[in-house]
Image (cartoon, helix red, strand yellow):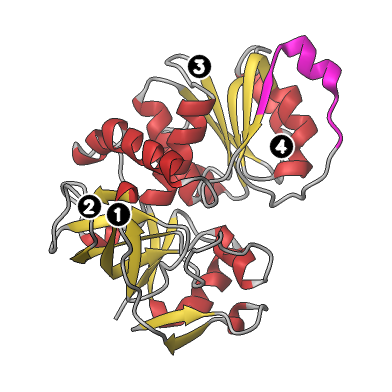
Amino acid sequence: MYAITIPEPGGPEALVWDEVPDPVPAEGEVLVEVVAGAVNRADLLQRQGLYNPPPGGSPYPGLECAGRIVEVGTGVLGWSVGDEVCALLSGGGYAQKVAVPAGQLLPVPAGLDVEQAAALPEVTCTVWSNVFMVAHLRPGETLLVHGGSSGIGTMAIQLAKAVGAKVAVTAGTKEKLDFCAELGADILINYREQDFVEEIERATGGAGADVILDNMGAKYLDRNVRALAVNGRLAIIGMQGGIKAELNIATLLNKRAAVSATSLRARPLSEKAAIVAAVREHVWPLIDSGRVRPVVDRKLPMSEAAEAHRVLEASGHIGKVLLVAP
């Protein structure tokens, strides 16, 4: 098969479309013929040599894909050759075939084609596990989403609105904020022109955000805690703004607030399977019914993964960038 390889870490040009051995499904795995994969910021870090796959994982980038099962390994129940699926991966999505643990498979939702489904696994699992399983967002509460127009952000808006929460977002352009509003966002904050702490306080009558989903890390830590409501929960899922920051513990104590930080890639298979099962139970019916949808910015040939990385690095996109396999 062909896959995107990284012979040497570097810029987008480090991604090479090359012939590699076919993967072989182990016990409990299936082999998926990939129709499309999606690009995540973790892939950019892997390309730079800053985020290696977990032990035993595929060396190729790609944390999600969609396609058709072409082989079923021993011990797999409930899946058959020919099933159309999308999958959460620890790597290997930028390829024509990938071996996937059966617990990380999801059926292609009703009303979507296989390519569109490639935009779902990482964002649905990240949002559901952090906003709902960890931070326990409840109806009537306020969720603040940083990067509201990203793949994660567009999914977080829709899921939060589906459960009856109020949603605030930050983004850097009017176009992006307008799109977030179309998805249902209630409070729109241009982080280039406005202070999100002040805007959240104003919009909530001084109460603050009950849950914050943060992709920035260190740069926003202090302001995020200040923006939290009493009993608020901050869920950190990214480090785009750095890895080290000071935290005023007194503020955290006074608000009786909580800070959590999670990632998906290196979790044990059992934890990933539990998250995928929860997503299938709670999120898939919303997608099947059309209440929630994937947002796709563009599709590029998988062999042009370098261009897809340039698009993500420029941050002009809205939603997901997909890579279509030949």
The quadrant of the picture occupied by the C terminus is bottom left
Q: Give coordinates of residue 186: x percent, y percent.
A: 48, 28
- Circle nearer the viewer, 2 or 4: 2
C-alpha span from label 1 to label 3: 40 Å
Name the residue that disc number 1 marks.
28
Disc number placed over residue 194 in the picture, else none: 4
Mark 4, Cα crowd under 10 Å, few <14 / some 14-19 / many 20+, is few
Residue type at mark 3: give it.
Glu
How packed mark 3 is, by other alpha carbons closer than 10 Å (few <14, some 14-19, many 20 or more), is some
| Residue depth check, mark 2 versus mark 3: number of the one nearer the observer | 2
Q: Nearer the viewer, residue 23 or 223?
A: 23
> From mark 1 to mark 4, how far is it between C-alphas?
50 Å
Q: Of label 2 and label 4, which has the lower sequence position?
A: 2
In which quadrant will I find the N terminus?
bottom left
Q: Residue at x 61, y 16 (%)?
A: 204
Question: Image height check: is 4 above or below 161?
Answer: below
Residue where numbered disc 3 is placed: 141
Q: Is residue 127 magenta?
A: no
Q: Earlier in the sequence, mark 2 or mark 3?
A: 2
Determine the residue located farthest toward the bottom in the rendered image: 19
Start and end of the magenta stretch?
Answer: 246-259
Quadrant of the image occupied by residue 229 = top right
Q: What residue is pinned by disc 2? A: 76
Q: Quadrant of residue 9?
A: bottom right
Q: Residue flagged by tag 4: what amino acid is it?
A: Gln
Vertical comparison of 52 with 218: above or below: below
Amino acid type of disc 1?
A: Gly
Q: Residue 10: percent from the left, percent from the top?
A: 67, 78
How many residues crowd mark 1 within 10 Å: few (<14), some (14–19), many (20+)?
some
